[in-house]
Image (tube, rainbow, N blue to C red):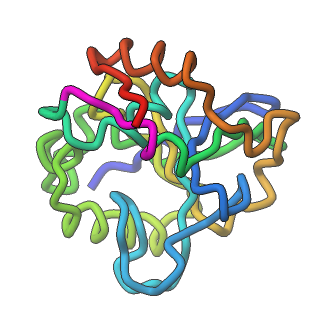
Amino acid sequence: MAVTLMRRIGEGVHLHRYHRAIHSPIFFGPTGVKPANRFDSPDGSYKTLYAARSIETAFGETFVRVPANPYILSTTIDARVRSVLVTTRTLRLYPLVDAGVSAHGLSFTDLHGDAYARTWEISGHIHATTSADGILYTSRFDNQRCIALFERASDAVAVSAVSAVPVSPSDAERLAAHFGKTYVAA
């Protein structure tokens, strides 16, 4: 198999997150050993932090979980807060964003679906066989870049001045509209 060239994100870059208010902006999950999200460890041996390069993409990845649902409820928004992380050094990310995904026997259908067994397996393989800080992947909601950062790179991000900020109804309405959704105050 050909050598995969890591993608780099430089120092000082902002990464956006919507996360549960009970967790720190720099939270590597899940809380237990069972994987829950797309690139979690299949065996619980490492934890993962998810972030996006833009606020819109972070919103989509967090709140547009069921694309057929035309609404985003305020109760869902109120359970999360927004934070911005800043990279403290250059990140080296394993790219799952182009034709190289087929080298792993994957397609973008596998990467963008909601059945995660294959992505957990690939995450475990990347974590075990490379020195990557994490995985660079494409959002399934707006075709923009996201990052699954491995816990071993926890020194590579810091919390910015935007930390655990509640999402205002006007921001929720604007961001929901970006995805063709309606924000509904409950």
Residue 171: % across, % down:
56, 19
From the viewer's perspective, is residue 11 above or below residue 39? above
| 63 sits to left or right of 102 | right
Residue drawn at point x = 17 percent, y = 39 percent:
108
Looking at this view, name the residue that lies furthest to the front.
186
Q: Is residue 140 above or below residue 48?
A: above
76, 162: nearer the viewer: 76
Q: Is residue 54 left or right of residue 115?
A: right
- Quadrant position of residue 131: bottom right
Is 140 left or right of 51, judged from the image as shown? left
Q: Is residue 173 above or below residue 87?
A: above
Residue at (38% x, 72% y) in the render: 124
Residue at image coords 45%, 84% = 44
Q: What stretch of residues is rendered in magenta?
A: 70-76
| Magenta span includes 113 | no
Residue sitting nearer the eye, 112 or 23: 23
Q: Residue at x 34, y 33 (%)?
A: 72
